[in-house]
Amino acid sequence: MNPHVEEIDRDTLAWLSASGMIGDEGHLERFRQARYGLLGARAYPYASRELCQLVTDWCVWLFAFDDAFCESDRRAAEIARTLPQLYTVVDDLDGGEAVENVFARALLDVKSRIAAHGDADQLDRWRTMTKDYLFAQVWEAANREDDVVPTIDDYIFMRRRTGAMLTVFALIDVAAECRLAPAEWRHPAVRAMTEHANDVVVWDNDLISYAKERSEANIRNNLVSVLAGHTDCTVQQAMDRIGRMRDQAIAEMVALGPVLDSFRSPSVSAYARGLEYWISGSVDYSLTSSRYVDAWR
């Protein structure tokens, strides 16, 4: 746990409130009770006070965008029409014009802080992953709108993007203040480790959030429902299968450990540890957060 957890939790809620992304007091109170600062503190226990605040604010932006925008009753076309406003901010093409969309304004704030702490390669990596995430939301919205349960292969491929984990993984070396060189980031072993960690976190989330989502429109975009819908298995059998998939992904990460150690790179080692912190931290957070626990009662 990051030692600055209490200040981070307090200040990330203040940042969210000031952003205007969550205008409803009841919804804001749910964010307060969920204590998202604990997620950032668990996922980035090694980060300085300022950098842990930055990455936690980004996580909260993702939760706010997902809850108040993507998983609302907005149609795919409406989400698609919003993307240019967000892409303009991410791509620095606003030409100095005022940013009116509240999500875009908060996104600009986060991007500016990443640029202040990271170099051009780190910022570009985050920008690329963020645009990929944003575009994937249109696909997910279309599934809800058309009542489509995606195929297993399609879901696994797109979940690596809709889950936004690549956007937070891209900030691990920024938070650790131990820069990954472009060649290290692109190395097949690092990419494989990243993909496995991504799968583990989003599959864990699908398992943990199933109780919350099972009565909502977005249940089609959950691996439990996808497996149950395409294999005629029960919900429990689907969950058991996901558990085995998760165990295999963890085993692949363990097998890649000696390969990454052979690099003798402090940056690669710090990045691999950062992936591990995200896996354990996200589970620890989810098993104690009102965001998920309230749905189990």
Image (cartoon, rainbow, N blue to C red):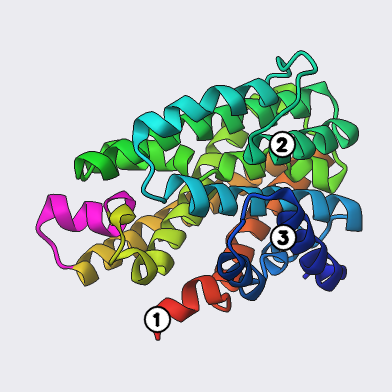
Say whether residue 231 is magenta: yes
Query: Of the numbered discs in the image, which one, if any, rests on residue 105?
Result: 2
Quickly name the residue at label 3.
40
Stretch in magenta: 220-234
3 or 1: tag closer to the N-terminus: 3
Residue 135 on image: x %, y %: 47, 29
Q: Amino acid at mark 2?
A: Arg
Horizontal side of 41 relative to 31 (left or right) equals right
Q: Nearer the viewer, residue 292 or 250?
A: 292
Q: Quadrant of residue 276?
A: bottom right
Residue 282 on image: x %, y %: 59, 63
Residue drawn where x is 52% and y is 71% of the image: 291
Question: How many other residues sit within 10 Å of disc 2, few (<14), some (14-19) or many (≥20)?
Answer: some
1 or 2: tag closer to the N-terminus: 2
Question: How many other residues sit within 10 Å of disc 1, few (<14), some (14-19) or many (≥20)?
Answer: few
Query: Of the numbered discs in the image, which one, if any, rests on residue 296?
Result: 1
Q: Amino acid at mark 1?
A: Trp
Query: Of the numbered discs in the image, which one, if any, rests on residue 94?
Result: none
Say whether residue 54 is magenta: no
